[in-house]
Image (cartoon, rainbow, N blue to C red):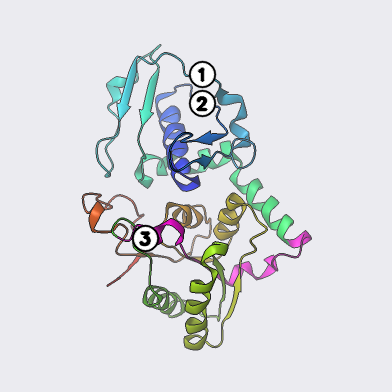
Amino acid sequence: MGGLGNQLFQIFAVLSYAINKKHDFQFINSEKLGEGSTTVRSTYWNSFFSKLSRCLFNEYPEFNVVFREDGFTYKDVPNHLFQKNTNIMLFGYFQSYKYFHENYKLISLILDIYEKQQEVLKHCSSKKLYNTNLLDNTISLHFRMGDYKKLPDHHPIMSYDYYKKSLHHITTNITYIPNVLYFCEDEDIESVEETITKLMTDFPDMTFERASNKLDDWQQLLLMSCCNHNIIANSSFSWWGAYLNSNKSKIVCYPSIWFGPAMANHDTRDLFPPEWMKIKVT
């Protein structure tokens, strides 16, 4: 369900349970998700998730058990559901690092995350899309607007103040002047550039550069993960850009408001690793 960020949560959760319970796993082979609905999403079986190609099937098997996620907080799938010769379907978003954090390294090996990151860096260098030698001194900054503009009560758009506070927090905790690599959609560039212009005034010693729109979305996510530090939007996409960042001293800033008032029942207490920094949003 959902876009790339949501799919990553679901795939990581399935792989983690398969590892812990010593269960085989499989995914349905579909190029698109949500066909027939108002929002159709692409899948990434031939790109980001190509290492899972042997685990794809064209039809669902018969399931003995369907586990439906109840609520938004972390709730472990009951152990008794994982019986021998039982096909169990996990249904939900599973948006918490707690579902898979203990198996992160092994899952990263299964998906070949490091090699995928290196491929993206080589692609950026060969196409001269970004000087990847600068990434060790770079902060990624993500703007999530798009359909949020029509759904402010569900998904508020982060303000200039949030990004200013986040940059200030990071720069006061590092000893060098960083570059900023910002990510946004083409349709949002006018609004984004207004914010970037203000930030350039506030942080005149920094260099701000936009991530190339010639990269596919999954490539942009991996490029984000190769930056030293991350400022994420209220978006599962940039959540994963930060989570896949292997820098042990990374600083990740996230907004205190993730959902709007129409989704106040979505409790995000289990969404963020404790070492990430919550930035107050008003």
Q: Earlier in the sequence, mark 1 or mark 2?
A: 2
The amino acid type, in three-letter code, at marker 1 is Glu
Q: CA distance from mark 3 to mark 1?
A: 41 Å
Which of the 4 image quadrants contains residue 102? top left
Query: Residue at coordinates 25% horizontally, 52% vertically from top-left?
Result: 263
Q: Which mark is residue 275?
A: 3
Q: Residue 165, relative to residue 248: is it above or below? A: below
Q: How many C-alpha atoms fall within 10 Å of the one at disc 1: few (<14), some, or many (≥20)?
A: few
Q: Foreground residue, 200 or 178?
A: 200
Judged by depth in the image, the label closer to the viewer, 3 or 2, is: 2
Q: Are marks 1 and 2 in contact (CB under 8 Å)?
A: yes
Give the residue type that dot 3 points to: Glu
For marks 3 and 2 on the same chain, the one whose residue lies earlier in the sequence: 2
**Magenta stretch bounds:** 125-152
| Circle on res. 28 | 2
Q: Quadrant of residue 255?
A: bottom left
Amino acid tagged 2: Ile
Residue 261 horizontal/vertical position (percent): 23, 58
Q: Which mark is residue 59?
A: 1
Residue 103: x, y in percent?
Answer: 45, 39
Locate the C terminus by quadrant.
bottom left
Nearer to us: label 3 or label 1: 1
As rendered, which of 74 and 281 lies closer to the eye? Answer: 281
Residue 41 x/y as whole percent: 51, 42
Q: Is residue 246 above or below residue 160?
A: above
Q: CA distance from mark 1 to mark 2?
A: 6 Å
Asked whether residue 234 appears in the rendered view, the answer is: no
